Amino acid sequence: MPSKSARRLLDVALVLGVTYLVAFLGVALWRAPFPFELEWMEGGMVSHAARLLDGQPIYAAPSADFVPFFYTPGYPAVLALLAKVTGALSLALARAVSIAATGWTLFLLFRIGQREADWRAGLLSVGLYAALFRTNGAFYDLARPDALFIALVASAVYVAFYRATLLGAIGAGLIFAAGFLTKQTTSVFVPATALYLLWRDWRHGAAFLVAAFGAAAGGVAALDAAHDGWFWTFIFEGHQGHLFYWKNILLEYWRDVLFLAPLVLLLPLLWFGYKVPIVSLSVGLAAWWTYAFVFRARTLDYVPHMYYRELWYEAPRWQILVPPALIAVLLAAHRWRNPVGRLTIRTQPFWLLMFVAGAGASGLNHSTQWAYSNCFMLLSAFGAILIALATRDLMEGTSASRPRWGALVPAALLVQFVAWAYSPAVQTPDDGDRQALARLHARLAQVDGKVFFPAHPFTAYQRDGVVHVHQMGIQDVAFMKGGVKDLAPRLRQGEWGAVVVDEQNRVPGVMGPYYLAERLHYPTAQALRTRTGFLVRPAEIWVRQDPAPRPLGPGVSANFEDGAWVGWRTEGAAFGASPSKARRHGMQGHALAQAQGPAQGRLISDPVPAEGAALSLLVGGRGGRTGLRVRQGDAVIAQWPHRSHRGDLTRVRLALPAAAMGQPVTLELYDDDPKGDLWVDDLRWTD
């Protein structure tokens, strides 16, 4: 029996688990109403539901109108149904579905722990899964299918195990089919569950397989027929286009789990040694994971990694070695003081089987191209169950002559709970995000025509009432049947008034028909940036080409489309007698200011009021002593020396002193380099 100290440590672990549960609920409820993506694929997923509401198919030939994610349609179908009932489709509604699904999963984890052991085991299982929220990518509440399919898998497993009847087996099979039609990863659990049911009662196992495969196959056939074969193309052939990394499934997956959540591997390994006393198996697993530990320890100079960036103890990097090493020492000491044969293992082998299935499913996801840490969710859910039950077995089986050694297992739990600490504030939008979003909406309101916003298509849908393709869809089908063939032609036709591009993204075919009108400026590095996954935010606004003259201020041309130097004067021969009509990549309209060749000189504007906090302009060129100065009287208040060797024009922002706002300033383009070139276009005031 465990000692008082062991029970007290376990109680502390339970308190920490409840704390993590409260933290998750606080984060989820606080950020659910935020009307912009917390993770960059959220809006694309909700756009699937918008297609259904508009009576359009999800699975169709790739086009600029739509390309589906490579998922089955269960989650967007639920959103569309609820949107019809509530009268509105939103990110908040989509997140509410995920929060409810995660709540159901947590309830099932508690019930399983309670039924297999007691309420403490149930509460520990819940606390473990809640504590893994950030480790799992903070995906429990996002507008993604993960939370719903996890809830369906947990439900099917619960029914299969506790409803030991023919109807129970059939019900479990049907729930698994629903899970598969929500996310294909569900299929990994079907063989594992069937194996258990066939062992328990072959009739139940057979009925389960017929129900699961029959319903899933029927659903696939119906969906494929309704979508002219495109359903299968996307959910199967599309996935085949994603690379599978064998080195991940063999090593890197286990390495990452070992450093992100070492308890999830090491405590089941300790328990497994008692449950299945075949020394070679335990030693083999221990050796495998020891190699993974040594591999990471020898490569602490790794490139910054998206899985490790949230560890509060990553810097200095040697600290990431401490939690797995300390947990391993604590559990090894428990094994040393409690040899095999002295423990009575009460946990059913079914939960080990589900843990193995979860580990396998997570490993497959981790090893697929574009994977993120939400891949660990299945391992975490069923690991939480097994760890809670294994903790009961290990603590109750502690040798009566050495009761104090029973505290080693809850001590390992405490180490892991502390290592999982994260800041809820990092995961929640703040006033800076809301203000940045308001400025973005105000800027988009100025666009004449529809907006193409591939990283945030639901924002475009809310503005224009039309769904268009997501950035991931453009990338996903680049290898399939020619990709999105109609995107470039429609861009050339100027179908959209503006194209908004996120950081680290590109829209093929945008340059030429559109020009880079603005680089978005944010007050902080994190404002409006996604909170998890691909950490990006809107970065550029490309506007449809319009050669009409536009003033920077009274009597001063901003884009040189007038055919003459309106409001500008030249000194020297560098800039010529009039604006140049030479074609340059990235220019706006048909003309620009150009200084080229051995001649030197200046192009100076008439005084013009500074109507913004910064001057934005398109600029390109080659050479050194070229650039732009902003003068107030005789004083240079801002300058931008050009040092690029590229010929393409790109958007730059030149901040002005606050005192210059509203005051007359003079702009001076200069070329003092006989070997230098300078091109300038589309000047405008900006915030």
Image: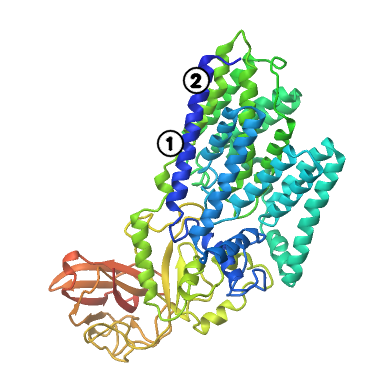
The residue lying toward the viewer, choosing from 105 and 523, is 105
Taking the image as shown, residue 64 lies to the left or right of residue 220, namely left
Determine which of the numbered discs, if any, sits on residue 316 in the image.
1
Q: In the image, is residue 450 above or below residue 377?
A: below
Q: Quadrant of the N terminus?
A: top right
Q: Quadrant of the C terminus?
A: bottom left
Question: Pointers 1 and 2 in contact (CB under 8 A)?
Answer: no
Q: Quadrant of residue 409?
A: top right
Mark 1 belongs to which amino acid? Pro
Question: Disc 1 vs disc 2: which is toward the camera?
Answer: 2
Q: Is residue 329 visible?
A: yes
- Residue lying at the far right of the rendered structure: 203
The residue lying toward the viewer, choosing from 533 and 74, is 74
- Relative image position of residue 667 (x, y in whole percent): 22, 76
- Relative image position of residue 461 (x, y in whole percent): 50, 71
Q: In the image, is residue 45 above or below residue 227?
A: above
Taking the image as shown, residue 547 lies to the left or right of residue 484, namely left
Mark 2 belongs to which amino acid? Arg
- Residue lying at the far top of the rendered structure: 401
- What residue lies at 47% left-to-right and 44% top-to-bottom? 25
Regarding mark 1 in the picture, which secondary structure is present there?
loop
- What residue lies at 56% left-to-right and 46% top-to-bottom? 102
Determine which of the numbered discs, if any, sits on residue 8 in the image.
2
Callout 2 environment at 10 Å: few (<14), some (14 to 19), or many (20+)? some
- Relative image position of residue 666 (x, y in whole percent): 19, 77
Taking the image as shown, residue 487 lies to the left or right of residue 576, namely right
